[in-house]
Image (tube, rainbow, N blue to C red):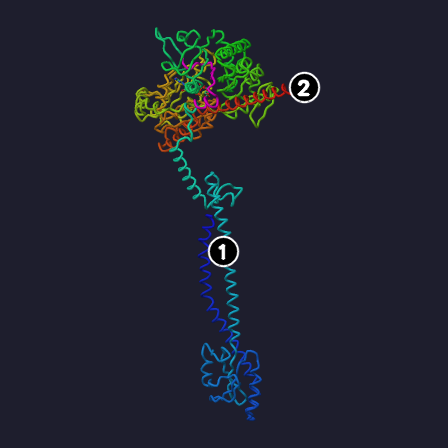
Amino acid sequence: MKTLRLQLRFLIPLLLTLVAAAYLALPLMDQLTLRWFARDLNTRGELMANTLSDPIGEAMAADRTRRLQTLIDRAVQDERMVAIALCTPDGVLLNRTSAYPKTLTCAASTALATQPDPRMRIEGGPVHVGVHPINTENGRIADVVLLHDLSFVDRRSQDTRRYLIILIAGLGLTMALITMIVAQLSWRGWVSGVRAIMRGEGLLSPMLSPTSGSPPPELEPFANDLRARLRDLEDEYRRAQGPEAEWNPDRLRALLHTKLRGDQVIVVSNREPYIHEKEGKEVVVKRPASGLVTAVEPVMRACSGTWIAHGSGSGDRQAVDRQDHVGVPPGHPDYTLRRLWLTPEEEKGYYYGFANEGLWPLCHVAHVRPVFRESDWQAYREVNQRFADAVVAEARSEDPIVLVQDYHFALLPAMIRAKLPRATILTFWHIPWPNPESFGICPWRREILQGMLGSTILGFHTRYHCKNFMETVDRYLEARIEQEHSTISFQQDTTLVEAYPISIEWPTEATIASWSSIEDCRRKLVERLNVGPDHKIALGVDRFDYTKGILERLHAVERMLEKYPEWIGRFSFVQVAAPSRSSLEEYKSFQDRIHMVSVRINERFGRAGYVPVHLLAQHFPHEAVNELYRGADVCVVTSLHDGMNLVSKEFVAARDDQQGVLILSRFAGAAREMPEALIVNPYHVEETADALMRAITMHPAEQRERMASLRMTVREFNVYRWAGRMLADAGRTRLRERIEARVQRHQDNHVDATPVY
Ligand code: GDG
């Protein structure tokens, strides 16, 4: 409809122009026709006069009037000739044919014939008047007046007029048709061009350069402007709107009550969400430095239920009741923490040994050799069994929803399944999954895979890790893999293998209100470092782990100061390194090495009152970490391999001033969701050093652009969405299982009721 209206706008003026042209052209055409015919008639007249000259000369010489009359009567029979008269050179009429008007004198006819329009009307219609001399040897002896019929000229003129009108109309229609086609094509071209731009493709590329995918060069500036404007508008709109339907605790609770009918939720993890530690005579509660706890704790607050974990704190036993239960969070409990006690031997073999010396380096492929000891494997199996027993003990029904967390419990899903076949077991693997070759070095690879396939749903952070897992199963087990549905069927059970990128809890308004202002955080940080207010500060926050790329980060800091010496004295790097697994030899030597490198850099570039690297190898309270995020200019995440990495998301959530730059390793799962960060390869020292330089010199407007976009992503893809998607999938599976069970019951009843003849 729109196209038609557009075309009419072209067509109506075009048709009006054609009508006007016809209106002006037709009289002109008449005149021209007449002039052509007049010329033609004059020529004919001269010819006739020449032909008549001799007979008329003879007749006049013989004075034979009758003969003259006969001559002109015969001549008038010529087609188109109406009348003829003969005049003497001095204007006396000698003879005339019968149709010659009596009133037309010789003088009048001569006068008329010399006019530009020698026409007159007689009784029979319009005639052309021509006067031609009759010349003989004796000179001009007479004039012959010829009245030619002009009615045929009128007829011809009308014919011409008709043809002209048909021609103009035809022309008009052809032009209209061409205009419509051209308009249609170019409209479509523009529409598809603009659509292509909106899709981020080339302008008109589908029509004009289908292979190139980019707009023709002359349209490039327009295409760029249009794209930029559309993006701005879209960004502004999305920022103003916020996420479409935000995932929050209420939505998660609603999902639990509708899709999961309020069934019991049990979480199992090694690390507990709250640790009671004895400090002198006091018992204080601490939150551990753990990505898993950061993510799962808010989900449990929303779901209630029971969290089973290793009670590792020195004051933990004091805090629990007779069933080893304690309500958490302390002060306003939302759920139950069930603590499970491990002997030092169990902890050594299962946690430090098999999980952290075996599976952790195996899955991270971070150049640390995995160690597999038979005794560790035994401890791992036994501890997994103890946790499985605890789950069974805590279950209030035969089909609870059990959320198994991480690589400490690879065998747990199958163990729970053996005791509670109708449980819905969701296992989430928080670390990467390697390729089949790398995984293949584990002596108990088949047992681990079988254990994991006891899960109803098995989640990883990325599709890449899912793919690696499915290929590993394909390599080492006899299982049916359906790539299309992302499922693995092994023995009686089917497991859905899916990517659920984990995240953090997006801060509520009340949380933000409780934070110190950005200015205060900044002031505290510069005071702590004893530097000026314009000093640039980059920050790293990690568990003190060799996979986090802390060494590579220090090398990049060193290279930056070497390459851009003008920043010596004006830039510092702060590394929070929360103690982790420090009893392991690999960790001890790594942590020592980091201390040494920090000292070396400080000796090389430091001077009185200036320390380039601040290594804070201690555990900070959560609020203190948040203050560091808010006070720093740059956050550096350079993991060599990381399932997701929550520090990057926490930094973004902390920056409600929309300032600050995130440097993020391409080997962290988070890099897939956060392309607005400065993405680096941490093994490339030069690249990371340049990224640091770029970050500390980045214009505030660019920082705002990047940070606003990152915040939008993290806000929308928050941890409630992570849990919600997994629990919604669990709800669907449970519903399907219930329906299948009902159908089976009907069939069984039907078989029972079938009469036997
Ligand atoms: C695993 C995967 C995945 C650090 N120092 C302190 C402290 N932290 C907190 C951070 C953050 C958490 O520890 C670290 O989380 P990450 O995600 O960065 O790393 P992992 O602990 O290795 O977590 C990882 C995660 O599981 C979730 O699935 O993202 O890829 O390796 O929350 O803030 N917290 C406190 N004091 C510190 O000194 N309070």
Q: Within 8 Å: ligand 1 and the Cβ of disc 2?
A: no
Up-down: is 679 above or below 425?
below
Q: Which element type, helix, strand or loop, lies under badge 1? A: helix
Label 1 and label 2: CA atoms lie apart by: 83 Å
Q: Quadrant of residue 336?
A: top left
- Please give the range of residues in magenta: 253-274
Q: Is residue 635 above or below residue 185?
A: above
Q: Does the rendering let one see residue 542?
A: no
- Furthest residue to the right? 757
* Quadrant of image for the C terminus: top right
Residue 44 or 736: which is nearer the viewer?
736
Tag 1 residue = 176
Q: Where does residue 548 sit, x and y in percent of width and height? A: 45, 20
* Left or right: where 731 falls relative to 541: right
Question: Which-is-in-front pick, marks 1 and 2?
Answer: 2
* Residue that label 2 marks: 756
Circle 2 crowding by C-alpha within 10 Å: few under 14, some 14–19, many from 20: few
**Sooner in the amino-acid sequence: mark 1 or mark 2:** 1
Q: Residue at x 46, y 18 (%)?
A: 546
Locate ligand 1 by image quadrant: top left
Image spot of residue 506 (x, y percent): 39, 24
Amino acid type of disc 2? Val
Find residue 359 and report its horizontal and vertical position in percent.
52, 16
Name the amino acid type tagged 1: Ala
Q: Residue at x 31, y 22 (%)?
A: 516
* Nearer to me, 459 or 635: 459
* Residue 576 inside the magenta-drawn segment: no
